[in-house]
Amino acid sequence: MRTINILNTSIDNLLLTEVLENLSNGIVFTPNVDHIIKLQKDRDFSKIYNMADYKLCDSQVLMYASKFLGTPLKQKISGSDFFPAFYTYHKNNKDIKIFLLGGPPGIAAKAKNNINNKVTREIIVGEYSPSFGFENNLKECMEIVEMINKSEATVLAIGVGAPKQEKWIYTYKDKLPNVKIFLAVGATINFEAGEVKRSPKFLSNLGLEWLYRLLSEPQRLWKRYLIEDLPFIYLIVKQKVLGDVYSCEGIKRLFLLFKILK
């Protein structure tokens, strides 16, 4: 299957190598549990998500969910794995010039230096760490657009959290004529700067990266992981039982369930 449906979100069933070999232009989002939950409530976010050319599984929990639903995804491709794979793959491709947008003050600059040192060329041609609430400041947003255009970047990697980063791409993409590839990368810029440690690989592979992040940043993340994302399990079981309730099969299952409960 080319795409897998998880709670009405289509996730591309691709390997990392397939994405790297075929991505020459387009928008890349990396859905995780938090995104999926937000998509159930935020219609604008859902509309924007549907415009993405690639939606790559960012979560081992989604991998487990896809298996539970009987439509397993091939591979987890988190933003923090995809981005370094992307710039490494293109280290000798002079047409790939990346602008980093995100992180607290100074973080994007550190990430820029680290990445350029790794690939031994100036693949990151510009960076900016926006102010808090910048998305509501038209003046700052237009200054960012000007910075990106002046840098002649062909790739924008924006990591300011969901749904902010996806909505910013949607709003300003048409003002960035040189940018061919848009990457919404979440906390990846912080990781690349070396300011925030990633979860150990064995925890990631078990689907416990969320727990590591919660313990690392409890004040910021407790509400997301312990309250907001909790309905995910119920919704996945509901999808398993009912399928797509708008399909013929879903209607049959719903009718059968009502019959049993009578």
Image (cartoon, grey):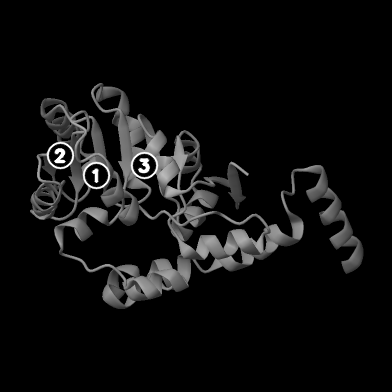
Residue 94, quarter of picture: top left
Between 85 and 242, the one lying in front of the other is 85
Which callout, 1 or 3, points to the residue nearer the camera?
Answer: 1
**Crowd band around label 2 with a 10 angstrom C-alpha radius: few (<14), some (14–19), many (20+):** many
Q: Kindly identify the residue that appears in the image at 25 percent across and 34 percent down.
A: 155
Distance Cα–Cα, label 2 vs label 1: 8 Å
Q: Earlier in the sequence, mark 2 or mark 3?
A: 2
- Which secondary structure lies at badge 1? helix
The amino acid type, in three-letter code, at marker 1 is: Tyr
* Image mark for residue 166: 3
Q: Which residue is mark 1?
A: 87
Q: Kindly identify the residue that appears in the image at 26 percent across and 51 percent down.
A: 84
Q: Kindly identify the residue that appears in the image at 86 percent across and 51 percent down.
A: 252
Quadrant (top left/top right/bottom left/bottom right) for the N terminus: top right
Residue 48, quarter of picture: top left
Quadrant (top left/top right/bottom left/bottom right) for the C terminus: bottom right
* Image mark for residue 123: 2
Cβ atoms at labels 2 and 1 below 8 Å apart: yes
Between 8 and 203, the one lying in front of the other is 203
Compared with 171, 202 (above or below) is below
Residue 10, quarter of picture: top right
Between 229 and 106, the one lying in front of the other is 106
| Residue 8 visible, this angle | no
Cβ atoms at labels 2 and 3 below 8 Å apart: no
Compared with 96, 36 (above or below) is below
**Crowd band around label 1 with a 10 angstrom C-alpha radius: few (<14), some (14–19), many (20+):** many
- Which secondary structure lies at badge 3? helix
Where does residue 253 sit, x and y in percent of width and height?
83, 55
The amino acid type, in three-letter code, at marker 2 is: Ile
Where does residue 61 sit, x and y in percent of width and height?
50, 65
The amino acid type, in three-letter code, at marker 3 is: Glu
